[in-house]
Image (cartoon, rainbow, N blue to C red):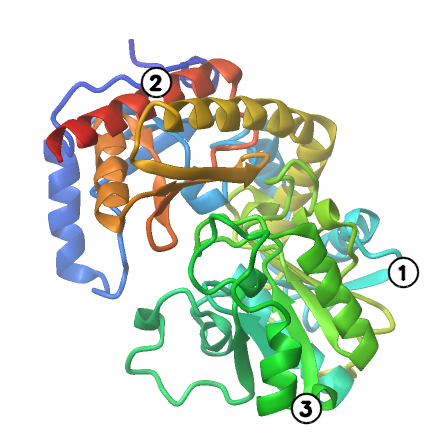
Amino acid sequence: MAYDTYEELAALDAPRIRTEIPGPNARAVVAADAAVTSPSLPRAYEFAPARGAGSVVVDVDDNIYLDFNAGIAVCSTGHSHPQVVSAIQQQAERLIHYSASDFFLPVYSELCARLDQIAPISAPVKCFLTNSGTESVEAGIKLARLHTGRQYIIAFLNSFHGRSFGSVSLTASSAQYHAGFGPLLPGIVHAPYADSLSGFTDLEHPDTPGYIEKVIFKRLVPANEVAAIILEPVLGEGGYVVPPKAWVRYLRDLCDEHGILLIADEVQSGTGRTGKMWAIEHFDVEPDILLAGKGIASGMPLGAMIASGSTMTWERGAHGSTYGGNPLSCVAALETIDLVEKELIANTNEVGALLIDGLRAIAGRTDMIEQVRGLGLMIGIEFESAAVADAVEIACFERGLLVLRAGDKAIRMSPPLMVRAEQAANGLKIFEDACAAVSSSR
């Protein structure tokens, strides 16, 4: 069967592998790619997608996969959701581009108004739209410094905020991201995420409680020179780590005490990924600035920097973007937000609970898995070693399940928010089979 329509392909509950993995066409794509693309691209494994529908992706050899990474947590409404596709097509027929930086693009302000409605900030907000998550982070850095008149920003070890220059200076998940690019942006200081240095399997007993006050404020930088603390409410590339609620509350209180802005980087954890529109909502904390990207427009290039009107105090011309908030991305975001609010948050909580329970049951049947953690459909599986996590990732790929490494020795599962229970059940079977194959080969 060709599965030519969206409905036919999206209805599949399990992979269909017809060639060796990678297949001959995928190998040809990989070879052609190596000749012309930047060698800096990290590439997880030799997967060459051709088309997708819902939580299903077909490669160039017509192998069919269950996608449990959603293009790195980007395809929130699934691949090529008909409502998102229709909105893009209709907008493309009317207007593809006009710069909202210099002119008044109606759909730009329409989306900003929608973001105001869903922002986890009680005061009215204003929005600056970007092309990506890392651009949102860069905007947040600039606004925080300008608004406070302070230069220092505190970020966290194991965090990932992007690869552009300011963002990568905040990133501290791998030294490779910094290698050869120094000196990086000055004024960045790092602290242990959740006050934990040795690992994330017991966050209720941190290694270095109160590190910011005891070390940074006392030994490195006075609190009154810190512009912002930037936080991933759930650690992303660092391993899908959910911090203790008390620690996030502590950061909010610390910021309030010293006039510091709290920035929530929700590029990966936002847009319903954790079962709430924004992960910060799980902690009953309001940020001063919220950064969005990835899943906000179902795969179209868009990010947002959202802040209360009292925080977004920069003047006309202080920041802009030629393409940020382009019409196609804006209409995709409007459809995405509606779908997430009306349908997909409920599904995320339901299927996310099935996956977490199933993964914890698998962990009880193998000694390779140290911990299963997560919120909604942002799930991390910690293994005994990086080598084992690497091997399980590839074993899943060979069996038709797309997952992705994270942290030092974890695998992340972040399927589209519309993944079905039947697909989750089959994904769990494949994952356990992959674990068993790796275990038997040790």
User: Which residue corresponds to mark 1?
Assistant: 123
Q: In the rendered structure, which amino acid carries the disc numbered 1?
A: Ala
Circle 1: element type: loop
Q: Which residue is located at x 60 percent, y 83 percent?
A: 216
Q: Earlier in the sequence, mark 3 or mark 1?
A: 1
Question: What x and y, as percent, mark residue 222?
Answer: 68, 91
Q: Which residue is located at x 47 percent, y 52 percent?
A: 200
In three-dimensional space, the C-alpha distance between marks 3 and 2, rounded to whole angstroms, equals 52 Å
* Residue 171 shows in the view: yes
Q: To which quarter of the image does residue 366 belong?
A: top left
Circle 2: element type: helix
Q: Is residue 212 left or right of residue 183?
A: right
Q: Is the residue under label 1 in contact with that under label 3 (CB below 8 Å)?
A: no
In three-dimensional space, the C-alpha distance between marks 3 and 1, rounded to whole angstroms, equals 29 Å
User: Which residue corresponds to mark 3?
Assistant: 222
Q: To which quarter of the image does residue 179 belong?
A: bottom left
Q: Earlier in the sequence, mark 3 or mark 2?
A: 3
Circle 3: element type: loop
Disc ID at residue 429:
2
The N terminus - image quarter = top left
Please identify the residue farthest to the top as the structure is shown.
1
Q: Residues within 10 Å of mark 2 (few under 14, many from 20)?
A: some
